[in-house]
Image (tube, coloured by chain):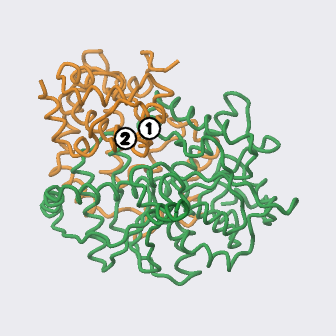
Amino acid sequence: MIVNGKQKIWSDYQKEIPDNHYFYVRSCIRQNFFPASEKTFLDIVRNKLGLDFFETEHHTTCGGIAYHSDSIPQETLMTIVARQFALMTESGYENYVASCITSFGIYTEVLDTWHHFPELEAKIRQMLWDSCKREFKKPTHLAHASDVIYKLRGAINQNAKHRLINRYTGKPLKVVEHIGCHYSKMFPSKGVGGAEYPYVLVGMVESWGGEIVDYPERRHCCGFGFRQYLVQANRGYSISNTHKKFESMSPFEPDMIITNCPGCPYFLDRWQYVISEMEGKTYGQNGQGIPVLTYEEVAGLVLGYNPWDLGLQIHQTNVEPLLDKIGIEYKKEDKYKL
Amino acid sequence: MGKLYDKLMEDYRFKEGLNACINCGTCTAICPAAEFYKYDPRSITDIVQSKDDDEIEALLKSETIWYCGQCMSCVTRCPRKNAPGFIIQALRNLSQELGYFIEAEKGRQQYAINKAICGNILNYGYCIYPRTFSHKNHPESGPVHKWIEENLEAVHKRLGSNLDGEGPGVLRQIPQSDLDELKRIFDITGATKRLELIEELSLKKAKELNMTEEEYINYTYTAVEKDHLNQ
């Protein structure tokens, strides 16, 4: 009975992820700080796996960072989102995939609020018409880009050139997965595995040979905090949260961190540098830092992409110790070649 | 009694965020901001459900409503399906609408945030845009970001971006017709009016402090004069 109950709970947190035909929208933060990750994602799904992911240059920010830092009213955010949906509708697509966790949370929230308050949806439809003369259908499926990679993890594994195995010991790499708060903390049923046991990154890591590290502050926020990072006076909040996570994971000696949200890898990467500068403390084996990667970068390494084509040279924390452990060949002299 | 509560109830996030709070404090226990700042989402939720106008007005003028980092960890954990993170959004919205934000050091940061983020949205179509994200304002971005900044076009070309280019791709130039649509959305949905209100009240405050606009923005962006920390 208990097993059946657990299976029932788990089934509530499985989401239907379409196989193909997506309208793709980009992430402000990922484009700025991990631009090659989006390029890699589209190269994998389009060129390696032959799938249909459409992008239009007319889409914009979803406004999520402005919304969560209190700069724009809810109606403004919703109308920008409605415009994105209109672009999807006009392009003939029904499956919507976002490259950003903040955006994914925004889209989920907007659709949920419209579900509970249809009069608000009607108001936003009118506002969109008045401002842009556009109309829209709501997506039949909403995915984060990591959901798609999760779905394709087996296909990626079949084409793997490398696995997440430590070549010196033959053991699985110890991987910290950081899910990003807005993936499923607000609406657990919309993320693979829900908020308690999010499986989207775990599934990738296990499929590609790695081993997940479970540590006390695994679900703690990276510390972005929107206005708590955007304003210089507040950044102590941001680094304190990252510090808390690193202190918690450090005894487990992780080889790497894989991230879901575009912002989290930036903070987990850069605040390691700042902690080192402020306190002289470096994490990771031999004090070399713990490399922090996006899931696209990890998928790219598994598939045999050149690390410098993946943009790993624009991380502050060096990735070479990880590349060496996996056995990935790279040219040092090419790292900063432009 | 209840007038400010009624104003809050006009906000859908408040309607979604407040059920019956049982004061268990689970939200405070899980909250990253409560560990760092003098912040207690439990008591904030309790105050708003009291419908006490005086207490809610004090909250709207306080530092505490600006401490939340919007991670929404509280939403997952509340055993009564409250969402203190949504309640905070509604409080911050009303604090701005009524001009109370100007009373708080952390509230006064809003003008600097608006100038940066909404400036990026309306000028470029992105919340964050590489030519306005400087190493000078973000020294924590590290030496690697200084290198990126000094070689922006070449780095993005190397990584396959379409920086300021035509057509789709990473950091493409978003066509002016689309930026015009964003501006009309801002006008029709109340964002422009809100930004103008924040600007008006902020410049008035700058004058009171005998500061230029630039000095005021720099001051609110960097100043920590009150004791905000939970230690």
Q: Is residue A301 visible?
A: yes
Circles 1 and 2: CB atoms closer than 8 Å: yes
Residue B85 image position (x, y, % from top left): 36, 39
Query: Crowdedness of circle 2 by 10 Å Cα count: few (<14), some, many (20+)?
Result: some
**Mark closer to the observer (1, 2):** 1
Q: Is residue B158 visible?
A: no
- Residue depicted at 15% across the width and 67% down the height: A133
Mark 1, residue position: A230
**Horizontal arrangement in the rendering, residue B23 relative to residue A164 (left or right):** left
Residue A129 image position (x, y, % from top left): 14, 64
A70, above or below A62, in the image: above
Residue type at numbered disc 2: Ala
Query: Crowdedness of circle 1 by 10 Å Cα count: few (<14), some, many (20+)?
Result: many
Can you say which quadrant of the picture contains the C terminus of chain A? Answer: bottom right
Residue type at numbered disc 1: Leu
| Residue A22: image tag | none
Using the numbered discs, state the Cα–Cα distance from disc 1 to disc 2 in whole angstroms: 9 Å
- Residue depicted at 59% across the width and 81% down the height: A48
The chain containing the residue under callout 1 comes to: A
What secondary structure is marked by label 2?
A: helix
Residue B22 image position (x, y, % from top left): 33, 32
Display colour for chain A: green
| Residue B116: image tag | 2
**Horizontal arrangement in the rendering, residue B72 relative to residue A258 (left or right):** left
Residue A11 image position (x, y, % from top left): 47, 66
Q: Residue furthest right?
A: A168
Q: Are marks 1 and 2 on the same chain?
A: no
- The chain letter corresponding to orange is B
Q: Residue B199 versus residue B224: which sits nearer the camera?
A: B224
B16, above or below A260, in the image: above
